[in-house]
Image (cartoon, rainbow, N blue to C red):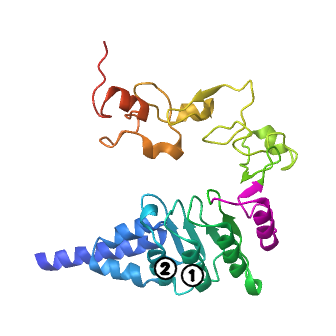
Amino acid sequence: MRTEEKEQWRSESVHKMLMVLLPYLHSLFELLSMSLVSPALRNAIRDQTVLWTKVVVDPPLSSRLTDDILWDFTSRSAGKLNTLILRKCSRVTSKGLWRVVDANPLIKKLIVTGCTELVPEGIIACVETLTKNNQKLEALHINGVPGFTKDHLSALSTYLPQEGAIDLEVCPKCDQVRMIPPCSRESCKREGRNERECRGCWYCVPRCMECAVCLGPDTDVEEVGCGGDVLCLDCCQTLPKCRFCNKPYCTGHSSLRQDKTTTDTAMFACQSCDYRTGANASDPIVLD
């Protein structure tokens, strides 16, 4: 086989293997990254409707997503979109979201957490559209969308009566509409959902920032390096820690670690130590 033929065969083989991987990509970032490999792959990703039945937008793309861009990507599903997950998409409006929902009535999972330009009335309009003609919306996550009241939550509950379908509830301790996480403590799991003593929002019940287990007055905890939150000892032992102050970083704030110059997760400086020492995460530690 000549060199040119070998190169062509190798290129075709790689392309076929990448095509097999496409259905396993989970986010818009992954799809867009893969589309840069070759023009042929880019066209294949654009034209395969099945790849666009689930659209997931996470940071860092979240801040760049607009109504028009969202419409462009979701239109590729040809009305077969069933899962739409938008996290911290601060430029997506209720009007833009409803346009997508109206064109995709088969959506069963709608997650718009942290999308601060959305309003409760817009979310209710979207849910009303998705529950017409016996269509069933199975999950609605709206934590971080501002302005929700008990009246809004009551209106949503008429369309989504199943328990746990909406991630917001009325906290039994402060009577505010907030997210109430499930507790991972075994003794709390054995109690009924509404009977457990630790049932309450993050503001009312101290919890581990990583696993959400409730933290009683006698529970040993460890302060995290990424804010004023705390971790249970089990989570503290498994998470990477700042090389200077030895405080752990929770998974939710891992993007704030000052470790841009190294791939070693054990080599990072928390924001406080990085500011105080001016150290680079890859600099050697010098002992006095």
Residue under pointer 2 = 71
Q: Secondary structure at mark 2?
A: helix
The correct choice, above or below, for 9 with respect to 222 in the image is: below
Q: Position of residue 215 (x, y in %)?
A: 71, 33
The amino acid type, in three-letter code, at marker 2 is Trp
The correct choice, above or below, for 19 with respect to 87 in the image is: below
- For the residues labelled 1 and 2, say whether their Cβ atoms are less than 8 Å apart: yes
Q: Position of residue 163 (x, y in %)?
A: 80, 62
Give the residues drawn in magenta, as a range.
146-169
Residue furthest top in the image: 288
Q: Position of residue 58 (x, y in %)?
A: 48, 61
Q: Which quadrant would the N terminus be assigned to in this image?
A: bottom left
Q: Is residue 88 magenta?
A: no
Q: Quadrant of residue 145?
A: bottom right
Residue depicted at 40% across the width and 25% down the height: 244
Q: Quadrant of residue 205?
A: top right
Q: Quadrant of residue 278?
A: top left
Residue under pointer 1 = 99
Residue depicted at 56% across the width and 32% down the height: 236
Left or right: 278 with respect to 190? left
Q: Secondary structure at mark 1?
A: helix
The amino acid type, in three-letter code, at marker 1 is Arg
Q: Depth check: 44 or 55 in front?
A: 55
